[in-house]
Image (cartoon, rainbow, N blue to C red):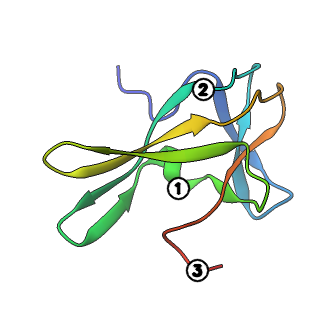
Amino acid sequence: MYKPLPESVTIKPSGVHGLGLFADQKIMHGTNLGMSHIKIGDTIFRTPLGGFINHSNTPNCVKAELRNDYKKWNLIASQHIKKGEELTVRYTFYKI
């Protein structure tokens, strides 16, 4: 069965902007939460995980670039994230 988000993450209203990703349970530093973006040709597509992650100047996640025959980025927890805490990343693909 396809699951667009890992079981440890949910979507809720965000204090940062609109909707955001929130931890349903403690997420340990270094946890790979899955693919957030993929680049095909010159176009970058967001997955559901990438579509709801909000920007922060002090993020608790990073996008790790992985290369195969195409570029893709996975969302990685860059610190321990408490249950109920919003997951954030520093935007690099979009201007804010």
Label whose residue precedes the other's in the sequence (2 or 3): 2
- Mark 2 near mark 1, Cβ–Cβ under 8 Å? no
Task: Identify the element where label 1 is drawn.
Answer: helix
Q: Is residue 1 left or right of residue 70?
A: right
- Distance from disc 2 to disc 1, alpha carbons, whole Å, reads 21 Å
In the rendered image, the residue lying farthest to the bottom is 95
Residue 30 marker: 2
Could you classify mark 1 by the number of other residues whose Cα lies within 10 Å: few (under 14), some (14-19), or many (20 or more)? some
- Distance from disc 2 to disc 3, alpha carbons, whole Å, reads 26 Å
Q: Which residue is mark 1?
A: 51
The quadrant of the rendering that contains the C terminus is bottom right
Q: Is residue 80 above or below residue 76?
A: above
- Distance from disc 3 to disc 1, alpha carbons, whole Å, reads 15 Å
Q: Is residue 19 above or below residue 17?
A: above
Q: Quadrant of residue 2?
A: top left
Label whose residue precedes the other's in the sequence (3 or 1): 1
Label whose residue precedes the other's in the sequence (2 or 1): 2
Q: Nearer the viewer, mark 2 or mark 1?
A: 2
Could you classify mark 2 by the number of other residues whose Cα lies within 10 Å: few (under 14), some (14-19), or many (20 or more)? some
Query: Mark 1 is on which residue type?
Result: Gly
Relative to the observer, which residue lies in front, 90 or 46?
Answer: 90
- Mark 2 near mark 3, Cβ–Cβ under 8 Å? no
Residue shown at 71% from the left, 55% from the top: 19
Residue shown at 27% from the left, 70% from the top: 43
Q: Position of residue 11 (x, y in %)?
A: 67, 42
Q: Which residue is mark 3?
A: 95
Query: Mark 2 is on which residue type?
Result: Gly
Q: Is residue 13 left or right of residue 61?
A: right
Residue shown at 73% from the left, 43% from the top: 60
Q: Quadrant of residue 14?
A: bottom right
Q: Nearer the viewer, mark 2 or mark 3?
A: 2
